[in-house]
Amino acid sequence: MSKFRIGCLTAGIIILLSVGAVFAAVNIGGNGNGSASEPLSSSSISTSFSIPLIDSDNDGFSDWFEENIAGYDPNIPNDRYIILYFRILEDPGSIPYAIEKPTKFFIKKGGVPLENIITLAQEEAYDTNLQNAIEQIAEKSDKNDIVFLKIGTHGTSGGFSGNVKYTLLDEWLDQIEAKVVIVVIMACHSEAALPILKEGGCPRIVYAHTSGEFIGTLGNDLRYSAIADGQYGNGDGYVSIKEVESYLTFHIAPAPKPTWGFIQGTDTSNIADQIYLTDYKIPS
Ligand SMILES: [Ca+2]
Ligand SMILES: [Ca+2]
Ligand SMILES: [Ca+2]
Ligand SMILES: [Ca+2]
């Protein structure tokens, strides 16, 4: 491993750890499991809001959210399929931030069924396991569904640790039919993945050099979410993928941009403002 790569990795770990620290701080504040006014994403439970939280198609997004915020169809399931890939063997301490907390977020705040989340951690994170995970999802997903792949590992301009080449990943992802495939990569040189992965058989949104803070901004870190929606978005209390991108682009890495290590992305179908990974509502 070159010194430069070690430097890249260190930068990635610092970002992960800082997000973890903020996550812990938020939990201490008592918001970790949401407040009474926070919509749950399934069943017909009502809260102090007057919004009836019916989920007619049982996809984990409420009818109200689908009709009024996301523009999804409340009668057609928009299933979510998630792969969390993390391989930094010398850093087992990052597993909670890379795997466990995102999984908990998607299940508890996002209403994603556990069986729709595939985690590949450390020795499990390598090429054939990732290919198998993508193929499992490809068998189940349809044009209404949302697929999210999060990668955290060492990288080169050609691929990442676990013997995965970006050109092969692109071919594997081509097997998926979905409303959108979202790929988030934290690895050295991952900006090189953007031109390779940016287009496929269905719309793709790809971000390089982002990891835990991406999940944080979705709702795992309420401070990030509130700024993303309130300062960089439409202030409706929900965080779109575009709002995450804007927050991480303009707030975390304001101009003049650092030359390395901060989010770069592609959204060739220009749909990130219409895509939501959860119906998590920022508590008001
Ligand atoms: Ca629904
Ligand atoms: Ca739906
Ligand atoms: Ca489906
Ligand atoms: Ca919003």
Image (spheres, grey):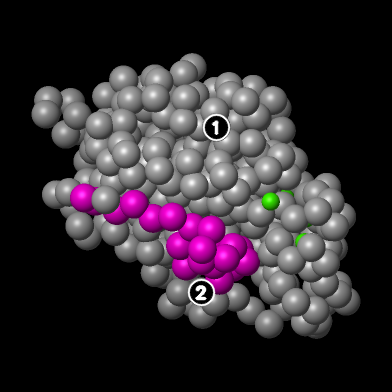
The mark lying in front, picked from 1 and 2, is 1
Residue 34 location in percent, x, y?
60, 75
Residue at image position (43%, 46%) is 133
Horizontal side of 100 relative to 88 (left or right) equals right
Report x, y in % for residue 59. 71, 61
Q: Dot 2 lies on which element?
A: loop
- Name the disc covering residue 117, or none: none
Q: Residue at x 43, y 77 (%)?
A: 28
Q: Quadrant of the N terminus?
A: top left
- Which of the numbered marks, if any, corresponds to residue 175? 1
Circle 1 — which element?
loop
Q: Position of residue 261 (x, y in %)?
A: 36, 31
Q: Is residue 202 left or right of residue 254?
A: right
Q: Image height check: is 113 above or below 52?
A: above
Residue at 74 percent of width and 66 percent of height: 58
Disc 2 target residue: 32
Disc 1 Cβ-to-ligand 3 distance below 8 Å: no
The alpha-carbon separation of the residues under discs 1 and 2 comes to: 36 Å
What are the residue bounds of the magenta stretch? 103-123
Query: Which residue type carries mark 2?
Result: Gly
Work out whether 52 lies above or below 188: below
Q: Would residue 282 be counted in the magenta stretch?
A: no
Give amino acid for label 1.
Answer: Gln
Tell me the quadrant of the picture where the C terminus can be found: bottom right
